[in-house]
């Protein structure tokens, strides 16, 4: 169960990083 939460939080973090990365690229 703990491993599942770690993987889930990791995927969520990557999604947020990609989302904000694309937004910053569009702003520039």
Image (cartoon, rainbow, N blue to C red):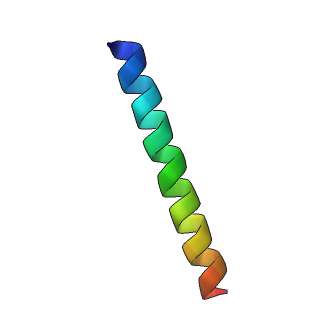
Quadrant location of the C terminus in the rendered image? bottom right
- The quarter holding residue 22 reads bottom right
- What is the tally of numbered marks visible in this picture? 0
Position of 22 compared to 1: left or right?
right
User: In the image, what residue occupies the spot 66% across and 77% down?
Assistant: 25
Residue at 32% of width from left, 13% of height from top? 1
Q: Residue at x 43, y 44 (%)?
A: 12
In percent of width and height, residue 23 lies at 55, 75
Q: Is residue 9 left or right of residue 21?
A: left
Query: Where is 18 relative to 12, above or below?
Result: below
Q: As drawn, is 4 to the left or to the right of 20? A: left
Residue 18, percent from left and from top: 58, 58
The image quarter in which residue 27 lies: bottom right
Where does residue 2 sit, x and y in percent of width and height? 35, 14
From the top left corner, tell me how far across and down residue 5 is, in percent: 36, 24
Please determine whether, in this image, residue 12 is positioned above or below residue 4.
below
Residue under the point 48% across and 55% down: 16
In the current view of this chain or complex, which residue is farthest to the bottom? 28
């Amino acid at each position: 169960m703990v491993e599942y939460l770690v993987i889930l939080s990791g995927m969520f973090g990557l999604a947020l990083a990609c989302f904000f990365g694309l937004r910053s690229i569009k702003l520039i």
